[in-house]
Amino acid sequence: MILKFKTELPLKDNNENNTLGTPSLSQVILETNLPGIPLHARGKVRDVYAIDAETLLFVATDRISAFDYILASGIPDKGRVLTQLSLFWFDFLSDLTPNHLITADIREYPFELRSYSDQLEGRSMLVHRARMVDVECVARGYLCGSGWKDYQATGAVCGIHLPAGLEDGSKLPEPVFTPATKAQSGHDENISFDLVVASIGQDLADELRRRTLAIYAKASAYAATKGILLADTKFEFGFLGDTLVLGDEVLTPDSSRFWPHESWRPGGVQLSYDKQYVRNYLEQIGWNKQPPAPALPDEVAHETSRKYKEAYRVLTGKELLTT
């Protein structure tokens, strides 16, 4: 069943001067509408269209999810941040791994897509259709989130035993590979490396771990030069023929925890450039984490947008491309 398309969020921007540099909330794209282009899938954030048997169009909307539910509000320019930051990292990591990107230049898109530039510019990319591996490849350099909860209960994360006495936000002795199951809906669950081996085989499991930790090492070292700690992140891989490639999004505020180094203090929730700000708000209002998911106040949506754009600016050294 195809969901009803919506291209605008019916809220007013109360900031008449728009001092935060974000578009009005009425311009937030929650769903795309590309008549004549087959909709392949609609995820928590991305709308995916089938161009042909070997090519997909990824469009990052401004939807935001938290606690496994899509919220009723969007975040201005969020989709552009996700796409343009992923493009930056695809290029930066090209010496470590191939990826599924074909192009993000609309001028190189099939002719039938060009009339939809208002929905595609800066937030879309054409990619090769890969056979995805059903494992979330998570790298952790710091103890937080579900890893912290696992450690509190077992003294380990995904079966990897850690030293006693660590705190929420502590730096780990060395980065660890902590895989998870992939969930189209609901919550991804941490699993042991042994379960990954049982599911996909020893050789592929070893390569996913090796490549995940190599990417994390290079990206975290780079982020550190910008004053950012890459606490954890997750990747997805797939096959193009016999070649294992990096896919989906890469090192964005949706898939990663970015912490300002200057404010990092183990022992609690950290200041961040990612959607932890939204999670904190939802915890404060006492949402029971059941549908329907609430809308966000304008100020929370704008502040989240600011954090996402600041992450892009600090990491890339450039201002976000907007229309």
Image: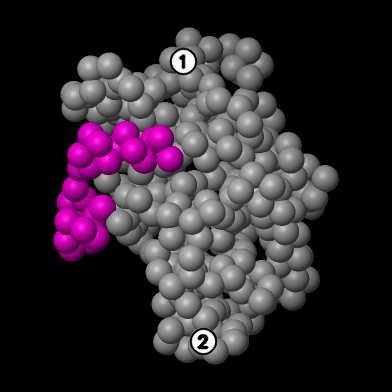
Vertical arrangement, residue 267 with respect to residue 95, above or below: below
Q: Which residues are magenta?
A: 281-307
Report the mark closest to the observer, 1 or 2. Answer: 2
Instruction: Decide if residue 182 is on the left or right side of residue 30.
Output: right
Q: Is residue 129 above or below residue 270?
A: above
Q: Is residue 289 left or right of residue 35?
A: left
Along the horizontal axis of the image, is 5 left or right of 258?
left
Write the residue at 33% across / 22% down: 19
Measured as percent of width and height from the top left, residue 162 is found at 59, 84
Q: Name the N-terminal-most of marks 1 and 2.
A: 2
The residue singled out by tag 1 in the image is 323
* x and y percentages locating residue 313 in the rendered image: 56, 33
How far apart marks 1 and 2 lie (CA) works out to 49 Å
Residue sitting nearer the eye, 133 or 68? 68
Q: Secondary structure at mark 1?
A: loop
Q: Quadrant of residue 93?
A: top right
Q: Residue at x 53, y 12 (%)?
A: 114
Q: Is residue 98 left or right of residue 304?
A: right
Q: Quadrant of residue 303?
A: top left
Can residue 276 be seen by looking at this rendering?
yes
Q: Are marks 1 and 2 in contact (CB under 8 Å)?
A: no
- Is residue 128 in view? no
Residue under the image location 42 percent in, 77 percent down: 149
Q: Which residue is mark 2?
A: 165
Q: Quick check: is 301 in the magenta stretch?
A: yes
